[in-house]
Image (cartoon, rainbow, N blue to C red):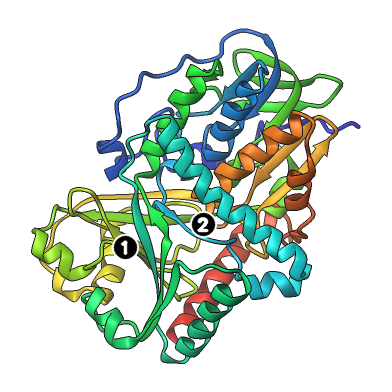
Amino acid sequence: MKRRTSIEGAALDLLNANDRPGQYPESYYAATANRVDACPELDADTDCDVCIVGAGYTGLSAALHCAEQGLDTVLLDAHRIGWGASGRNGGQLGSGQRRDQEDLEAMVGADKAHRLWDLAEESKQLVHALIDRHQIDCDIRPGILYADHRARFVAGTRDYVNKLRSDYGYEKLRFVGSEEIRSILGTDAYFGGMLDEGAGHLHPLNLALGLGRAAAAAGVRIFEKTEVTGLEPGEKARINTRKGSVRARFALLACNGYIGALDADVSGHVMPINNFIIATAPLPSDLARSLISNNAAVADSRNVINYYRLSADNRLLFGGGENYGYRFPPDIPAFVRKYMLRIYPQLEDTAIDFGWGGTLGITVNRMPHLARLAPNILSASGYSGHGVGMATLCGKLAAEAIGGTAARFDLMASIPTPRFPGGGALRTPLLALAMVYYALKDRL
């Protein structure tokens, strides 16, 4: 198969459009990250069994699991371990897939929907197991509260809780009525919701750094500040960088929203979008607990979602806002703050210490896009904001497939993920149109 690709001359280089090369953004996560030594840049040609592009959760998990199979593994990242969405996200480790089980049953049938639920449950267990086994200090805490911002959504939420408890045996989820949700959250913005005590939240960059430390200890050769410039398929894939190349029996693209022109097929299925988060100054304990009394993370029912939680040092970490292009707003704290104040106007006089943006990958149906690009080249991406658990698991599934056991990777790959219309040329205007549409739905 002739599938030679190169990213030279790409129209918009999201790897470098909004950030300084090789440096973490000035985020709360970077400011409180566990100390790790930088990895070297690849500056020569090398050979290996497996080469993985992208040191986010997918790539880190795949590298660790490949190394544990005894495979000589090289992991490349254009910037730093956890530099992308894996080190910038809201830190929510959610249950299930990104789509509700009712949607999945209609999409793939009840049997496969149950298998997908089981995989998603395994993704949470895997994250916990990796944290425990490798002693990763990442402030993991239990609970996500899903909050309905429209009264008409509440009955459906109650029905969905009952469905998961009865049909899937998931008893860690319960319905929350209007009085209780207002006692948990210090706001009148919501009418009900559901509390998932089997889900959780954590410091996402420290999780990534801990996985990187574990992978290196297992023998993975990690190269940072090593941007891949092209991929040449063959009996041994050749992964080209600016100062060297890697020849590998197997390759995995774990690039998510940063895939760019490295593979046109994957980029046709996975669209990059930006999200933005702010961190307040540390809050007095009584104020912090008045905002979220049970210390759960929160995600609301808007299409342009608000998501937030308290940090280990009592800051409110709040994500939200609409962005109609790929450039970050010039003043991210001001951009996000207005959304925070719609939920918590009592924080009007609270200082904002950090504001940062990041790029994630979404698919049309919001399910991960796993694919075989060639017999020895795999790709896994498109987690659509649900990647803390699922990206970690999909890295393990890719490692299983590389090791010769492909059934679970192929199950995820069998989920149809349609292509985005219009290709790269229409991506930015389509993104703007979609964001206007969903923001209008929220307001109506």
Q: Quadrant of residue 172?
A: bottom left
Q: Is residue 255 above or below residue 271?
A: above
Q: Residue furthest right?
A: 1
Q: Which mark is residue 322?
A: none
Under mark 1, the amino acid is Ala
The answer, for residue 124, to whether it is visible in the render is: yes
Q: Position of residue 106 (x, y in %)?
A: 74, 75
Q: Nearer the viewer, residue 134 or 345?
A: 134
Residue of label 1:
296
Residue at the spot 74% in from the left edge and 36% down from the top edge: 378
Q: Of tags 1 and 2, which is closer to the observer?
A: 1
Residue at the spot 34% in from the left edge and 82% down from the top edge: 190
Which is more N-terminal, label 2 or label 1? 1
Residue at the spot 30% in from the left edge and 44% down from the top edge: 139
Q: Is residue 283 above or below residue 291?
A: above
Q: Quadrant of residue 207?
A: top left
Crowding at mark 1 (Cα within 10 Å: few <14, some 14-19, many 20+): many
Horizontal side, residue 319 vs residue 289: left or right? right
Q: Position of residue 96 (x, y in %)?
A: 57, 61
Mark 1 residue element: loop
Crowding at mark 2 (Cα within 10 Å: few <14, some 14-19, many 20+): some
The answer, for residue 272, to whether it is visible in the render is: no
Q: Quadrant of residue 180?
A: bottom left
Q: Position of residue 372 (x, y in %)?
A: 80, 40
Q: Position of residue 314 (x, y in %)?
A: 18, 54
Q: Nearer the viewer, residue 239 or 56?
A: 56
Residue of label 2:
385
Residue at the spot 43% in from the left edge and 84% down from the top edge: 443
The answer to the question of whether label 1 and label 2 lie on touching residues, with beta carbons closer than 8 A, is: no
Q: Nearer the viewer, residue 10 or 110?
A: 110
Distance from disc 1 to disc 2, alpha carbons, whole Å, reads 18 Å
Q: Nearer the viewer, residue 182 or 205?
A: 182
